[in-house]
Image (tube, helix red, strand yellow):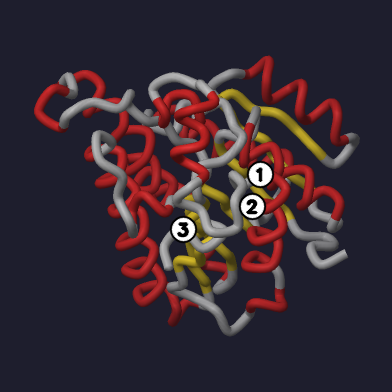
């Protein structure tokens, strides 16, 4: 029970990696608020995880919505121990100059602006308590970019740099900030990364991963649990690969 009596918010936890992180956190003793723009999905995950899981609708790119999440968390969870910025989107693969302005803005709003907004609303109470853990779910795309996903790659590079900057600034307040860099995983975003889901394209993707498989929500949940637990108390500013060797 590495997270016994801890409180956590996980954004984008209605599916994919976020749901896997929520499942692991609950198994390790945490009380979790599952935030997702798809409230039905959040409720479904929370319902499956039991009495220590709660659902809340949140658009992580909207300041008022994130403020509402902070208010709800204070009422439901009390003081927050762990914040996981997991919500993310991508654009479909295409040459960088052909991505629409709307798709670029959406990717940056959900993947980058969300980290800024979460910091605005959740860092001040963590500073007051002089304790807290923030985990940003970035991607191998921010370290070893794939062609035709340029602006998604850039958004994840932002998350990695933001993680390091936040870590050094917040360390004097007892707040740790880390990131995870998963490789492409068996999540709803996989088809969007590939453009289309065919055996040939899957084989091409898998050929770039030495361990020969996609990441799973369980893989990411296990790594997130470690970095958010007291076992990682001396670790901050790390962007840890969960990539089967993809970035070697």
Residue 228, quarter of the rendered image: bottom right
Disc 1: CA contacts within 10 A as few (<14), some (14-19) or many (>=20): some
Quadrant the C terminus occupies = bottom left
Horizontal relation, residue 166 to residue 46: left or right:
left
Say if mark 2 contacts mark 1, CB within 8 Å. Answer: yes
Horizontal relation, residue 237 to residue 214: left or right:
left
Q: Nearer the viewer, mark 2 or mark 1?
A: 1
Q: Which residue is mark 3?
A: 246
At which x and y percent is residue 147? 25, 40
What element does badge 3 sit on?
loop
Front residue of this view, candidates 121 and 89: 89
Disc 3 to disc 1, C-alpha distance: 14 Å
Front residue of this view, candidates 235 and 150: 150
At which x and y percent is residue 226? 69, 67
Q: Which residue is mark 2?
A: 220
Mark closest to the chain's N terminus, 3 or 1: 1
At which x and y percent is residue 49? 85, 35
Q: Which residue is mark 1?
A: 216
At which x and y percent is residue 17? 62, 41
Mark closest to the chain's N terminus, 3 or 2: 2
Question: With respect to residue 246, does 227 lie above or below?
Answer: below
């Amino acid at each position: 029970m590495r997270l016994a009596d801890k409180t956590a918010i996980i954004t984008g936890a209605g599916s994919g990696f976020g749901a896997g992180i929520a499942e692991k956190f609950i198994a390790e003793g945490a009380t979790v608020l599952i935030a997702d723009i798809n409230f039905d999905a959040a409720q479904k995950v929370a319902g499956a995880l039991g009495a220590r899981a709660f659902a809340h609708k949140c658009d992580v790119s909207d300041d008022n919505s994130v403020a509402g999440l902070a208010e709800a968390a204070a009422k439901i969870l009390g003081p927050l121990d762990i914040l996981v910025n997991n919500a993310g989107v991508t654009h479909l693969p295409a040459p960088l100059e052909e991505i629409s302005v709307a798709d670029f803005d959406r990717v940056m709003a959900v993947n980058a602006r969300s980290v800024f907004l979460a910091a605005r609303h959740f860092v001040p109470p963590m500073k007051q308590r002089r304790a807290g853990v923030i985990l940003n779910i970035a991607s191998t795309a921010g370290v070893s970019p794939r062609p035709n996903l340029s602006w998604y790659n850039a958004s994840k590079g932002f998350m990695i740099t933001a993680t390091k900057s936040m870590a050094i600034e917040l360390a004097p307040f007892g707040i740790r900030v880390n990131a995870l860099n998963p490789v492409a995983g068996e999540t709803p975003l996989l088809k969007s990364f590939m453009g289309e889901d065919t055996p040939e394209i899957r084989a091409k993707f898998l050929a770039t991963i030495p361990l020969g498989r996609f990441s799973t929500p369980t893989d990411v949940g296990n790594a997130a649990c470690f970095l958010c637990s007291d076992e990682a108390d001396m670790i901050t500013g790390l962007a840890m690969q969960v990539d089967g060797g993809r970035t070697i």
